[in-house]
Amino acid sequence: MSAENQLQVIFITNDRKNKEKAIEEGIPAFTCEEYIKSLTANPELIDRLACLSEEGNEIESGKIIFSEHLPLSKLQQGIKSGTYLQGTFRASRENYLEATVWVHGDTEENKEIILQGLKNLNRAIHEDIVAVELLPKSQWVAPSSVVLHDEGQNEDDMEKEEERERILKSAVSEKMLKPTGRIVGIIKRNWRPYCGMLSKSDIKESRRHLFTPADKRIPRIRIETRQASTLEGQRIIVAVDGWPRSSRYPNGHFVKNLGEVGDKETETEVLLLEHDVPHQPFSQAVLGFLPKMPWSITEQDMENREDLRHLCVCSVDPPGCTDIDDALHCRELKNGNLEVGVHIADVSHFIRPGNALDQESARRGTTVYLCEKRIDMVPELLSSNLCSLRSNVDRLAFSCIWEMNDNAEILKTRFTKSVINSKASLTYAEAQMRIDSATMNDNITTSLRGLNKLAKILKKRRIEKGALTLSSPEVRFHMDSETHDPIDLQTKELRETNSMVEEFMLLANISVAKKIHEEFSEHALLRKHPAPPPSNYEILVKAAKSKNLEIKTDTAKSLADSLDRADSPIFPYLNTLLRILATRCMMQAVYFCSGMDNDFHHYGLASPIYTHFTSPIRRYADIIVHRLLAVAIGADCTYPELTDKHKLADLCKNLNFRHKMAQYAQRASVAFHTQLFFKSKGIVSEEAYILFVKKNAIVVLIPKYGLEGTVFFEEKDKPKPRLIYDDEVPSLKIEDTVFHIFDKVKVKIMLDSSNLQHQKIRMSLVEPQIPGISVPPDTSNTDMNEPERKKKKLQK
C-alpha cells in the first residue's frame, strides 16, 4: 500500500490516562470535544456535545446551592439500616417547589413522602430513583394547595426562590401534615430526551440559553447553542448531561429540531415523544411476517376451526371504524332457548409468538387514538383488512358462544376458533334505527332485537350487583374536510346500541377470564380494578354534603345506589357532576398475572374476575388471552413464555405503562385540538360548574365543550384579592363571595398565546360579579340570541 493511501487512525477518548498513553505511542489522540471543535466546516456539531462541566472549577466561585449527593455505597448502607428510604421521585405539575417520593417496598406507613423547597428536592428529576432521609416530625409539612410555576429568567435569583418557598408554609392543622423528607442521593437517573422550546437569553450574542421542557414536571435546562435565533419558536429536543451543585438548573445539549411550534404535525410529534408512544413506521423485519397477498383461507387454516359462515353475524361500531374487532349473532334454538355468539378477530392466528411482529406489537402494547391520527399496534394489513371483521368477506375468528334462556341466564358456554362471514357492518345509529323500525323484520334486525333485549337484562343485573355507571365528559371534534381543523365540538352521544355491544363484550371477557383461570391458575393474564382507599372519596362526600346530599362509599353497591339517589330537581346536571367527580376518585384498572396476586376483584364492574379478550387488534393483552384460551381448548400449542409467570408479570408492567401513556396522549391531543378550536372561534363566555376549589383558584367544567380549566384569582401584576380557603367544606371566599364545589358560574374562555410553549385556554370569571376580579363578558357572540347565532352559522 502506498504511503498516501494509508488510513490515518485517530484515537478519540475522554479518558485522560488513555489519551496520554496513545500520544506516547505516537497515535494522534483527542477528547471528543477537541475533535468536534476541530471540524470547522460543521460548527453546528458543537451544540450536540454533552455539557460536562468540571465540578472542581465551580467550587471556587463559592456559590454552592445544593448539598452533595452521597455515593451509592453510602446510600445502600443507609437503605439497609433504615436511615434512608428508596423510592421514585415524582415532580409536581402544579408546583415546581414540591414533589413526592413513592417509597418502594410494602411499608404501608410512609408510602408517600413529601418534599418541599429546592434544597430538599436536591437536583432530582421526575422519575429518578432516589434515596430520601425523613425529616423530624417538627419539620413535616402539608401538601400545599398553591399553584406555582417557575417563571424565573435569572438563574441566580435564589432570594426570590426562598421567598416563594415561604408561601408554601401556610398554617395547617396537625392532621394535614405528611411525612416529609429531603433527597440525600440519586440511585438511578431516569433521564430521557425532552421536547420543549428555547427561552433565548436576553444577552446579545450569548451562547448560553435556558431550555423550557414541555412537561412542566421537568426543570429548565441550560444549553449552549450558536443557532439560538433559528431555534426560537421551534420545538426542539434536548438531553440532560448533569446537574452541578452550584447550578440552579441542570446542564444539557441540543439534540434535534422538530419543527415550528403550533404546527399540527410538529405538535403531534411532540405529544407522541413526550408520552413515549412508539410511532415509527413498522420495519421491514416486522412487515416480513405478514401473510402474503392475495390471502385466502386454506384447508390447513380450517383445522381445529368451526365453519360458522352460515350464521347471521353482524358488527356494530362507531362511524368510520376500520379496525372491527368484534361481531355478534343471536338466534333462537329448537328448544326455545337463545344462542348468542361473540366473534372476535383471530389476531393470534397471524401473530406468532416471539417473531419480530409479535415483539413489536408487545412493545407498543396498544393502539393509540389521537384526534386525527391512529397509531396502530399491528400493521394496517391486519388492523384494517385481514383481521377486521368487515361485512361479506370470510374472516377467521375466535368465538364465545352461549346458550341462554329468555332471562339472559347462561346455560352453556363454549369457545371455538371459527370462520365467519359478517352480513352487515353497522354504525350504532344504523343498528338503533333497525331495532326501532316498525317495518323491518329481516334476520339481522331480528338478531339485533334479541341481543338488545338480553343486554338490557344483563345490564340491570350488573347494576343490581353494584357495578358503577360513571361519567366522563368526552368530546369529539367535527373536522373541516379541507383544512382538517376542528370546527365544532360534539359531546359523545350514547345510544342503547352502544350499551348493547358493551354488555356482550363484558360478558365474553368474564367468561374467558373464568376459563383461562380454571386452566392456568398460576399464569392467567387478568385485569383488576382495586377499590379506592376511603380517603379518595373525601372530596366527593364533602362536595355532595355541601349540596345537602349524602354519598355512601363503603361498598361499590352503596356508592352506585347513593349516586342514583343523589338527584336535584332544580339542578339536573348535578348528578352528572357527581359521577364525573366519582370517576376522579377511582384507582387505575391494571393487568396482572394470576399467580402473582391474590386480589382479582374488578371494583367498577362488580365482577370477581375479569380480563380483556374482545379487542386483540388494538390491545396486546387480548392477544395473550387468546393464546391462553386457544391452549385451554386445544386449538393451538403453548410456548415457554406463556407459562412463565415472571415473564407475564413483566409484560403486564409494560402494558399498564403503555395504556396509561396512551390515555394521557389522547387527552393531550384533545387539549391541543381544543386550543385550535378556540383559536379560530375567538373569545366566548359559557356556563361552567366548579369541580374543585383551591387556595387561589377554582377548577371548572364547561359542559358544552366537555372542557376543564382553572380560573386563577391572583395575577402577577394585579392587587391581591382577599382569599379565605376552607379545606373542611371545601370552599373559597373571594372578597365577599363564597364558592363551593358544583356552584354554577359563568366564565370567559380565550386562547392565551403569550407563552408559545404552553399556549393555554385562559378562563376568567364573568359571573358572579366580584369587583376587581370579574371581567365583562365578551359581547361579540354571547349577546346574540341562539336563533341568530344558528342563522349566522348557516350563512357561513
Image (cartoon, helix red, strand yellow):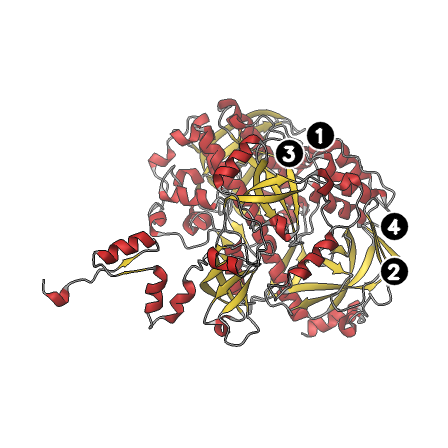
Q: Is residue 314 visible?
A: no
Q: Which residue is mark 3?
A: 530
Residue 261, placed above or below residue 420: below
Q: CA distance from mark 4 to mark 2?
A: 28 Å
Q: Nearer the viewer, mark 3 or mark 2?
A: 2
Residue closest to the eye, 259 or 575? 259
Q: Which of the marked residues, 3 or 2, is nearer the chain's N terminus? A: 3
Counting from the top left corner in percent of width and height, residue 444 is at 57, 42
Measured as percent of width and height from the top left, residue 450 is found at 63, 36
Nearer mark to the viewer, of 4 and 3: 3
Type of amino acid under label 2: Glu
Judged left or right of residue 308, residue 697 is: right
Please name the residue that numbered disc 2 is placed on: 735
| Residue kind at label 1, given as amino acid type | Lys
> Eyeballing the image, is 149 above or below 618?
below
Q: Which residue is mark 4?
A: 570
